[in-house]
Amino acid sequence: EIQLVESGGGLVQVGGSLRLSCTTSGFNIRDYAIGWFRQAPGKEREGVSCTDDGEGKTFYKDSVKGRFTVSSGDAGNTVYLQMNNLEPEDTAVYYCTADYIQYLGGSRHAVCRPNADNRGPGTQVTVSA
């Protein structure tokens, strides 16, 4: 059974840092695109990052580039989202997702979907001004 659980959220002041963890089980993260999404009250869920660990590639939302960094743990079952220089606009519930990577024409096609079947319950991040 595929499971994902986020942790590490909390309350932080503007300019502060948090590191979120996505602990996974039941699958090999190198076979899945791992996404971080967030949803603020009254707003739609938006993508923060999408990682193909097997290719060593991560794509970031423009507004978090240079501030957020995705990495994976040595054990290979945890994905981290390091968030620095946090802004009030980063306040949201953060989710991690896992989408199986398809091969199209012999090439890996990693896509992170906000409505992925495999998703954790989320962790709240609140940035105070």
Image (cartoon, rainbow, N blue to C red):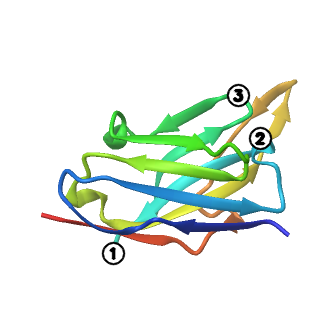
Q: Outermost residue toward the top?
A: 106
Q: Closer to the camera: disc 3 or disc 1?
A: 3
Q: Which sits earlier in the primary sequence, circle 3 or circle 1? A: 1
Q: Position of residue 122 (x, y in %)?
A: 52, 71
Tell me the crowding category of disc 2: few under 14, some 14 to 19, or many 20 or more residues within 10 angstroms, Cα based.
some
Front position in the image: 23 or 58: 23
Q: Quadrant of residue 39?
A: bottom left
Q: Position of residue 59 (x, y in %)?
A: 52, 35
Residue name at image x 48 percent, y 58 percent: 20
> Amino acid under label 2?
Arg
- Vertical placement of residue 108 versus 21, above or below: above
Q: Which sits earlier in the primary sequence, circle 3 or circle 2? A: 2
- Vertical placement of residue 117 versus 27, above or below: below
Q: Quadrant of the C terminus?
A: bottom left
Q: In the image, is 106 to the left or to the right of 37?
A: right
- Which of the numbered marks, if any, corresponds to residue 42? 1
Q: Position of residue 125 (x, y in %)?
A: 36, 67
Q: Closer to the camera: disc 2 or disc 1?
A: 2
From mark 2 to mark 1, how far is it between C-alphas?
A: 34 Å
Mark 2 vs 1: CB contact within 8 A: no
From mark 3 to mark 1, how far is it between C-alphas?
A: 35 Å
> Amino acid under label 1?
Gly
Q: Position of residue 37 (x, y in %)?
A: 50, 57
Residue name at image x 56 percent, y 66 percent: 6
Q: In the image, is 99 to the left or to the right of 45?
A: right
Tag 2 secondary structure: helix
Mark 3 vs 2: CB contact within 8 A: no
Which residue was labeled with disc 2? 30
- Which of the numbered marks, if any, corresponds to residue 55? 3
Tell me the crowding category of disc 3: few under 14, some 14 to 19, or many 20 or more residues within 10 angstroms, Cα based.
few
> Amino acid under label 3?
Glu
Q: How many marks?
A: 3
